[in-house]
Image: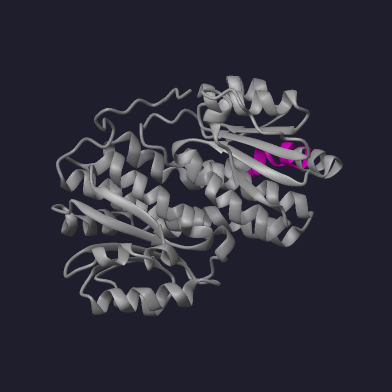
Amino acid sequence: MAPYGSYLAREIMAQPTVLERLLAEEQAIVSEVAAAIRRQSPSYVLLAARGSSDNAARYGKYLFGAANGLPVALATPSLFTRYQSPPRLDHALVMGISQSGQSPDIVSVVKESRRQGALTVAITNDRASPLAQAAAHTVWLRSEEEQSLAATKTYTASLMALAMLSAALNDDNAPAESLTQVPNWITCVLADAEEIVEAAERYRYMEACVVIGRGYNYATAFEIALKLKELTYVLAEPYSSADFRHGPVALVERGFPVIGVVPQGAVAGELDEMIRTLRQREAEIVGISNVSDVLGKSQTALAIPDDVPEWVSPMVSVVPGQLFALGLTVAKGLDPDHPRGLRKVTLTR
């Protein structure tokens, strides 16, 4: 089965164009939302999401905490729906993230938050969706229709929307300039798409693995693991490298696959040391990195550009993972556009 005729492959390859369009066409709206946030001066951020959007929210936890000094929590939607006991949300900024904007539980979080007087923002690919209607402000992902069941371009667009909003809140041109380079960095990764897809063939009999990241790329570990689970049916478990040391490291024996997401930055040294330890235990390392030592220790080295700042690296480092999942799907003889048991819009309550 050739991978490049699939919707999934086309949408992976479309990501630079999608992000360029989002940067060019939604910046004015993002600036308006940032101005509203500054006026209301919330004490904390509550992010509500499911699936890939929940992984984008994990990125938001690090981003708004590190760059904007805001405490961030992930919502518990069942408190709003099943238990009918929503928490008090005064002084909150509540953001719902959903590519479709359809999921009733995420809509419920935003609707109740707005009723309580919280500032509400929807980040969605459908500006006419129930989520967009429930929120006071909407950031439109402008990704066009995503036909692949596995989210790719809407995931990186969600990360970009969060990053644009964080940069606008600080009213600082330097972060915004870094964002304009992201499509180019992703284009550099996509130039090696064929090699990455082919590299996945080595793992066609893989049944389980772990994906390790930390800091901003904790989200990336979760997203790559999700892509592997939903496309290849591999039991892929995501971990922070810190949590992995607290017990799960016992899983690792000779030949056990470990995917490490290790961009340059504050956590690179600790992750490099963990990769070294795992190699000593004869693990099979797939390294997604721009750290030469990590790439040198990896049986399968998937490089990202050298000059990517850590805070935007999740938009870049997830792309080799997407391509790896695509290649493994095809290597296993599976259909990347029709994973079993999945629907494009999942309605949870």
- Is residue 304 depicted above or below 103 in this figure? below
State the colouring used for the structure image.
one colour
309 sits to left or right of 133: left
Q: Where is residue 315 in the image (x, y as percent from the top left)?
A: 50, 53
Does the rendering let one see residue 125?
no
Magenta stretch, residue numbers: 23-32
Q: Residue 101's quadrant in the figure?
A: top right
Judge by depth and name the residue closer to the eye, 169 or 244: 244
Q: Does the magenta stretch include residue 28?
A: yes
Q: Is residue 143 magenta?
A: no
Q: Pick out the residue farthest to the right.
A: 39
Residue occupying image coordinates x 68% and y 52% = 71
- Is residue 134 depicted above or below 310 in this figure? above
Judge by depth and name the residue closer to the eye, 249 or 39: 249
Q: Position of residue 165 (x, y in %)?
A: 69, 46
Magenta portion: prevailing SS class:
helix
Residue occupying image coordinates x 38% and y 68% = 245
Judge by depth and name the residue closer to the eye, 300 or 109: 109
296 sits to left or right of 79: left
Q: Position of residue 339 (x, y in %)?
A: 26, 33
